[in-house]
Image (cartoon, coloured by chain):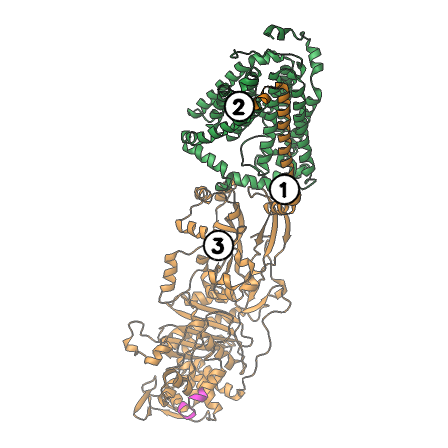
Amino acid sequence: MALRQHSEDPIRGLTRRALVLGGLQLGLFGILGARLYQLQILQQERYSLLAEENRVNMRLLAPPRGRILDRFGTALAINRQNYKVMLVREQIRNLKDTLLRLQQIVSLEDTEIERLSRDLRRTRAFVPVMAAENLTWDQVSRIEVNAPELPGLSIDVGQTRIYPLRESMAHIVGYVGPVSGPELTASADPLLQLPDLRIGKSGVEKTYDKPLRGRAGTLEYEVNAHGRIIRDLARTQGQPGKDLVISIDSRLQRYAHERLAGETAASAVVMDVHNGDLLALASVPTYDPMAFVLGISGAEWNRLIHDPLKPLSNRSTAGLYAPGSTFKTVVALAALEAGVEPDRTVHCPGHYRLGRARFHCWRRWGHDHMDMIDSLSESCDVYFYDVARRIGIERIAAMARKLGLGAPSGLDLAGEQAGVVPTEAWKLEQTGQPWQTGETLISAIGQGFVLTTPLQLTVMTARMANGGKAVHPRLLRGLRDEDAPLHIVRPPEDLGIPRAHLAIVREGLDRAVNDKRGTAYSSRIKKSGWEMAGKTGTSQVRRISMAERARGVIRNEDLPRHRRDHALFVAFAPVAEPRYACAAVVDHGGSGARAAAPIAHDLLLETQRLAPLNRPALPMAAVPDPGRDSRREG
Amino acid sequence: MSLLSSHGSEPDRRLGQKLLQVNWVLVLLLSLLTGVGLLMLYSAAGGHAEPWAVRQSMRYGFALLALLTIAAIDIRFWFRMAYPIYAVSLALLAAVEVAGSSGMGAQRWIDLKIFQLQPSEIMKVALVLALARYFHSLTGDALGRPARLVVPLVLVLVPTGLVLKQPDLGTAGMLLAAGGAVFFCAGVRYWMFAAMLILAAAAVPVAWDMLHDYQQARILIFLDPESDPLDSGYHILQSKIALGSGGLWGQGFMQGTQSHLSFLPEKQTDFIFTMLAEELGLVSALGLLLLYALVLAYGFAIALSVRSQFARLLVLGITANLFLYVFVNIAMVTGLIPVVGVPLPLISYGGTAMLAVMISYGLAISAYVHREVKIARRGPGDA
């Protein structure tokens, strides 16, 4: 009976129920014990690992980027301390709040906030993302003070690239910029994962980005729950970027830049005729590379890329010009090779007849009787019409190629143009039309299809001046820390041009400058022993695309602006024992003699005054190291 | 039996005699537990007695004094005071509830300088006292009458409702469970438990509607911590990581990386058990459980040795309370139940739980010291 049970002794009933309750409690304690056994013994490994992950963070250390120095050790690109605010995604509890607090200290535009949010999503959680850089000391200290309330936010001392010579070196040294999406996917280098890493975008910075960049190190460190670093645990040292020494003499380069600065658009090259070291490579207009480093505005960027004068482009390597009369040196060498006697004269009545067509000499009233040296010195067109017709375009083209025209020179600088050295086959392929003899004549005076860069003209001149050696232009002299300089100083190959032929052309160029009747007599160097030889050039041609050539070239008269010819001048010095080759081109400068020759005069004079080849260049192992902090963290 | 006879059943003893009767082993166990707590607080502070260990030991000294004082007072006094104490506790609870909801700040405790007293903690003792007194007078067939359960149900549900409104689900649950334990020990019929459960289930929707939106939100988060991973979900994960990385022997005293690198939240209060298990391992964690189990066992031993129904129910209720503290806290930090703010008594930093437990055991020891005292069955309201 149920009731019976309930009316039994309450004390006994209570004892039984108390025991049930005690048993229940014991059982529940047993569950707790089992749970602890499960967590602490069975799953210990898993949770220990998680604890370690909690505790240990890793980040990449960006090595300092190598410096770029000129041949005497002058700094062209160096690093400066740059205070940055970094965000680490995995440590941020509330991004919105953190950004709001940060904005009270550092002004951030909406676009920057967007960029930041994107970067934070794109990179791995432990990679710090830069929120703002180039902070003032005041901003730095305010952020440090507020650090406890801003988890995931920290100050990092990075490095900014500084280009002390700014505009004058922009086209050679180039600039660095953030890693782009395609660059990120193309490379396996973990360094590129650092969104604040800057890599070379143009110039030598781009060509030698790999050695300049160095190798990433890693730092493992212990953090607490707020992301504050407690201590460093392990550090694998990366490899700092290598210092780069280039062949440029920055003093000469600056001089060249200033000399050209008066022109709207011009370029000039000075090169060692024996080893191809580029001593100056100037082009105006130019730009300030610091603008890219400090963050260029959209408007500024648009102005740069839409400027018809193309300040971002290096005219001396990427500007294409019809060589004009400077090309006559090539024709002369080709003629000598073909057996034309240098003494043979041609009568110049001021024009040349080919069938029903008349080809004019620049001197309307003619030059009378001209031999090869005279015609180089006085730049007689008719003489070269005659010679070219005899030897044909193929021989001229072969000599042009030998001297370095019609193909990229192989300079270690991106964006170099190949130019055009036309042949019969080339024209047929390009236009489908057969070659006309008239085109041979026009080519002989460096017009028509022929296109060259100022650098190619310099190489051409150097090869004639150095006794027919296949010298190649180079910028890099060597990498620091490298036993052997990358610049291989192997004597250049001989082009197989007889010395006698070269002597005749050199004589012609000597007289073109130093003879009263020469076209550049007014630009001669008067200092004894420093005299230069050279050749003027005046080209009617603007930059013409292949497509336009195929359609038919628009006549000069139809051009909306800048009808004036390009002014060119190639030169070497000293005449007796050539060491320096030079080319100067002034866009739409008028005649070569008036606009370009004076520039070449000034440049070669200054070059010989500075005498970069007579001063000891920087030995590779002894690059000065002023206050570089190799322990930098990135 | 009359009230008079119960007075005279045992002669008044002197204080010294009473102190000799005190169950000193129990006091030693409680002190041992507090000592473990002080060690952990010393570690939590990075090897310093400040800011926690010193204050905590001062509190223990005060609480120990309270325990002995309470133990020395005749159990009949506590019998008489059961309802007044309950009434005062309820008034305090209602007062802080009103203060808390009337914009005077969310202060749910009373500042006693050395302690900050939460009326809800005191209510845990007061409820057991009041229920023990009620059921003391209720015997046999009276227990079978549902009408007899109305009063004790009201005694349980009113304070439970008040703390639920805070909302403090942990304390509310503990009040219900402790009340249930006293009901159970008093001999309430099983079918009545079943009926109460059904009624409770039916009452849930009504109670739900009475809650504010933010209270409902907090309850929802309580039931589904994953919905708020940054807060309680994060805490539980970190707690499990710290526990698991402790292993069998622990990472060493003051060597717990998770606790000391602040991954472990509330390491000196609600999550102090995790810290102990991380630093001293499974062995010490089970050792601590054993200490608590011994205290609980002493409670049962006392309950079975006292003569009055009031004292038995009181001690069993007190034991149930301590068990609930320990179980809820450890189940919480090991991720078995959602996070509710229940401290580990005597170990966690903080005075209220310690005071509540020490007062409780003061009453339990008083019951033991006066174990031969008989109390008349006929209480007020029992005709």
How busy is the neighbourhood of tag 2: few (under 14 within 10 Å), some, or many (20 plus)? many
Viewer-proximal residue, A305 or A438? A305
Residue pointed to by mark 2: B118
Q: Is residue A71 above or below residue B65?
A: below
Mark 2 residue type: Gln
Which residue type carries mark 3?
Arg
Tell which tag, 3 or 1, sits nearer the viewer: 1
Please name the amino acid that badge 1 sits on: Leu
The local secondary structure at tag 2 comes to loop
Q: Which mark is residue B234?
A: none
The N terminus of chain A is located in which quarter? top right
Q: Main secondary structure of the magenta part?
A: helix
Q: Secondary structure at mark 3?
A: helix
| Residue at mark 2 shares a chain with residue at mark 3 | no
Asked if labels 3 and 1 share a chain, the reply is yes
Q: Chain of mark 3?
A: A
Q: Which label belongs to residue A39?
A: 1
Relative to A44, A76 lies left or right: left
| Horizontal and vertical percent position of residue A103 | 43, 44
Q: Nearer the viewer, residue B70 or A429?
A: B70
Which chain does green denote in the image? B
Image quadrant where residue A38 sits: top right
Sequence order check: which comes first, mark 3 or mark 1? 1
Q: Is residue A189 above or below residue B45?
A: below
Instruction: Find disc 3 in the rendering and name its residue.
Output: A122
Check the residue under mark 1 and report the chain it is in.
A
Left or right, residue A586 beside residue B130:
left
Chain ID, orange in image: A
